[in-house]
Amino acid sequence: MKKTRLQELTINERLSIIEKFQDTYKTKEDKAKALSSMNSSDIDFLIYCMDNINGKIFYSKFKK
């Protein structure tokens, strides 16, 4: 199925957010520390933006 222009923009924005997070927190330990200090709604947003199941599971472990 071909994606619409809006779908493409949304996908690109979501991936951009994850890339920024991963560029800022490069190691798994850095990510864990950052996620530990975030509230659940911020983590939910990262989970929404994540494009793979392993990342979603990793982020979800830090929800309060």
Image: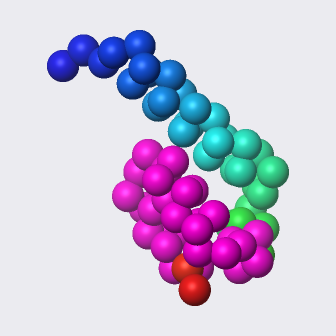
Looking at the rendering, in which quadrant would you find the N terminus? top left
The residue at the point 49 percent across, 59 percent down is: 47
The residue at the point 55 percent across, 57 percent down is: 45
Q: Nearer the viewer, residue 39 or 30?
A: 39
In the rendered image, the residue lying farthest to the bottom is: 64
The residue at the point 24 percent across, 15 percent down is: 2
Q: Is residue 46 above or below residue 31?
A: above
Report how many numbered discs are placed on residues in the image: 0
Looking at the rendering, in which quadrant would you find the C terminus? bottom right
Relative image position of residue 12 (x, y in whole percent): 53, 27
Q: Residue 57: within the magenta?
A: yes
The residue at the point 76 percent across, 77 percent down is: 37
Relative image position of residue 42 (x, y in whole percent): 63, 64
Q: Residue 9: within the magenta?
A: no
Quarter where residue 53 is shown: bottom left
Q: Is residue 9 visible?
A: yes
Q: Is residue 32 visible?
A: no
- What type of secondary structure mainly makes up the magenta span? helix
Left or right, 26 with respect to 4, comes to: right
What span is in magenta?
A: 34-62
Left or right, 9 with respect to 39, comes to: left
Relative image position of residue 36 (x, y in whole percent): 71, 79
Q: Nearer the viewer, residue 60 or 31?
A: 60
In the rendered image, the residue lying farthest to the left is: 1
Relative image position of residue 10 (x, y in whole percent): 48, 30
Q: Is residue 40 above or below residue 13?
A: below
Q: Is residue 20 above or below residue 63?
A: above
Q: Is residue 48 above or below residue 64?
A: above
